[in-house]
Each structure stands twice: as structure tokens, then as C-alpha cells.
Image: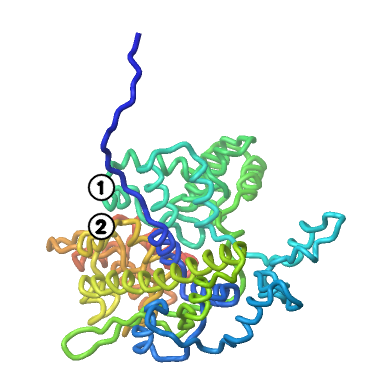
Amino acid sequence: MKNVGLGLQQTQKLVISPQLQHAIKLLQLSSLELAAKVEAELSENPFLEEIEESIEEKKDSESLGENNDEATGIDKNSLEMAINDQKGTVEPFTEETFFEDSSDLGYIKKSTIDTDGNSKQQFLENAFAVETTIYEHLLGQLRLLDINDLQFHIGEIIISSLDESGYLSPSVEEIADSLSCSAEEVLEVLSMVQALDPPGIAGCNLREVLLIQMDQHDEKNELARSIVENDLNLLERNKYKEIVTKYLTTLNDIKKAVKFISQFEPIPARQFSTKKIKYVVPDISVKKVEGGFSVSVNENFLPHIKVNNTYRKMLQSEDIGSDVKDFFNNKYTEAKLLVFSLDKRKSTISKVVEQLTEYQKDFFEKGPQYLKPLILRNIAEKIEMHESTISRVTTNKYIETPWGIFSLKFFFSSGIRKSSGEMKSSRSVKEIIKEIIQNEQNDKALSDNKIVKILSNQGIHIARRTVAKYRKSLKIEPSFRRRDF
């Protein structure tokens, strides 16, 4: 029989504070998303106020109201009268009376809820729709899976590495290398992500995206699967006769197979994309100055905020009811948290971009063809942060450089070793391929094999299929189609 008893055991565990959790959420927002969030907080939180001052002056005013006794734009007397007269004829000062015009906030006063129980209908009418990104959609499903912390982290990196079409850009080996784990572990999690909705998500190319959907589909067509797996290039060029000859079948069977293939979605994330114009506001600006480069975080789009001191003092008043005091305490905590998180976001982005500028110095001085291979771990180790933090910083962020505006993800790519032993970024190789094709003559379009030979003469040895992959990522048609224009 086992002995049961009580005992003390000292353990250590990592606990993420609420402040850090909030800062992490803001870190992955784009400039416009962050501005919208701050504007929403300003309209909803009485403890926040916008200040009209320069960025330099802002640093002196973000002490959360500890040393500032003056409030801006607040009628203190009217507020005190509302508090002192709670039991008199003046309407009590509560969260309901403060937000009198609540229709724009989705907030419903209790007095407006009818006796028939239509509160749900009123809420739906007052609420506003928020678009869900493919990242949020997949991450929500990933949280429901029975997986360990490492698997969740791998899945988070895979999801954050998807392009706008839902394709996985980096290879399994690149992800494994950046996370210091095995390729088998990444493949295991990748198969889980590919089983999520929407179908075909996280495929590396069109062939893989279609095969994933075929495997998940109830109806099977082996001929269609073989064509996608082995002869997708012939199908793209409408070479039906060659397909008929190869598979020793009839043209009618091929047409049925093509019809079966056409029901699948070639762009898995299409439903999450929008036809609206996507405005890009650079989060960071890098300018060449004497002796190097200057990095500055763009805050022109963001309202400058601080915690209102008058409301903070009201928390100490004994004349406020417990319900109102609880409401104010929550809003005060949220206000301090937002100011802290904005500062944390700015400092983290600055650290990452400063290190990125140092690492990619040749790019900023000479242009995109001089981009070096780079993975998340390279930056994470330099500034002593986790790879997931670097991934959040580089998601939905844009940087203004002497060569144009680029996504921060642009600077992270795998490496290709030249014959001289020098490592060349895969993105810089794409730029070279793009330049080669731009300089070709329309009636003499270069095939992928000829591009391979040109690159080989420059000391860059890659396979024809790699050239085809890079060309497709640049949205450049194959040579036989380029001759038509």
C-alpha cells in the first residue's frame, strides 16, 4: 500500500506577465492596425487622452501621471459634482452615464434592454465586424490540438511563414535550422497544419496544394492525381495529346480528370484576401547618414497618448461607489498597460532593425542583389531574444530603405553556396534571375535551362527546378508564354 502525505517541493517555471502578454499582442500588429487599436482605446477608456506634442516631448510625459498634476481638457468641477450628488437629483456618475452615447461602441445600457429579452439582437446590431486574418484563423485551430509546447511553437512559426496565398515559403530544413530542432519534428507539425482549414494550406507549391486537397477529398481519381503529381507542367500548357499518349488512355478520360482537378482551390488563403486597396505605412525608416545608417521607428500615424491624472486621483476618492471604482480600476490598469506595451513595441522593433541593418549592410549600400542569407536565429542570438519574438516583429511590418519599401520578411531567406565558397541569398538570386529575364529579347525568351547556364557562368549552381520555382515566385511566365507577347 502506498504512503500518502504532504510535502513541499521547490520548482521553477516561466510565467509570462500580463504586461508582456499585452506587448506581444501589439508587436505583431501592422502600423494601420495599431493606429486603429489605439484610436479605439482612446474612445473607450476615460483614463487615456491624446496629447499634442512632438515625439521628443512625449518621452517626458509618459510617467503615467505620477508627477503631473494638471489634466488636459477635463472639467474637474463637473465631475466632482456628479460624484458628490450621487444620492441627489443629479444622475449618478457611473460607466453607463459616462458612456451616454454608447451606440458607436457596441455598449448597451441596461435601461435600453427591453423586457422581451432582445439584448442579443441589440448587441448584434451595435457590434461591428472585424476581419479575421489567415494567421488568426489557423492559430485558433492550432490551439485546439493536443500538442506539446515545442509542437505549438513550430506550428506558430510555420503559420507566420505563410505568404498571402497560403503557401509555405521556407523549406522544412530552414525552419528546423532556425528552431534548432529536427526536420522530422517540423514535418510532423507541418502535416498537422496542412490538415487544418482551409484545405490545401501550407503547401510549398501548386502541386503540393492540389495533392493535399485531393487526399482530403472523399472522391478519388487516380488518373487526376498522377497528372498533378507528375505532369502538371503538361496540363498547364494544355498538352492533352501528350498526356493521352503517356497514360495510354482516351481524351475523354483526360477531360474528366481535368474537370476533377479544376474543383480544387489553387490559392488556399483566397477567402482571407481582400480586393480593397492595401495601404502600406512603413513602420521603420532606414536612411544613409555620415558614418553609417540611421534607424527610426515611424510614429507619425500613431496618436500620442498618456494616462489622465484627474481620473487617477478620482480612484482615491471615498465618494465613488464600489461598482464605479472597480470599473475605473480596470480602465486605469488597461491604460497603463497600453502605454507600457507601446514603448516595449518600439524598443523591440528598433533593436531588431538595428541588428538587421548591420547584418544586411551590403543590401542597404549596394542594392537587393547583395542581400545575404539570414534566418531568424541569427538576429535572435545577437539581441538575446526568442525566435518567435523576431517572427512577430517581422510580421506585417514594412521598412523604408534607399532602395524602396520592403517587408521585413524580405530580408530573411535561405543561402546558396557559390563555387567560390561565398554564400548567396536566395532572394538575391531571384533578383539576378529577374534581371536576366528583363534583358532578354521577346522573340528569344530564355528557357529555365538556359538561365541555369547563365547563373552557372556567374558561379551560382542551382537546379532547373529551382530556377522554375524562383521564376514562379516572381510571377514570371515560362519562356513559351513570354514569346507570345
Q: Please report the residue visible at 32 percent of the width from the left and 51 percent of the height from the top.
A: 175
Give me the disc on residue 421.
none
Horizontally, is 443 left or right of 389 in the view? right
Name the spot of residue 85 as percent of width and height, x first: 68, 77
Q: Please report the residue visible at 66 percent of the width from the left and 47 percent of the height from the top.
A: 259
Report the colour scheme.
rainbow
Q: Specify the amino acid type for callout 1.
A: Ser
171 or 3, which lies in front? 3
Residue reaching furthest to the top: 1
Q: Specify the amino acid type for callout 2.
A: Arg
250 or 414, which lies in front? 414
Residue 462 sits above or below residue 288 on the image: above
Residue 233 sits above or below residue 196 on the image: below
- Reading the image, the residue beneath label 2 is 377
- Reading the image, the residue beneath label 1 is 180
Q: Answer yes or no: do the residues labelled 1 and 2 have beta carbons within 8 Å? A: yes
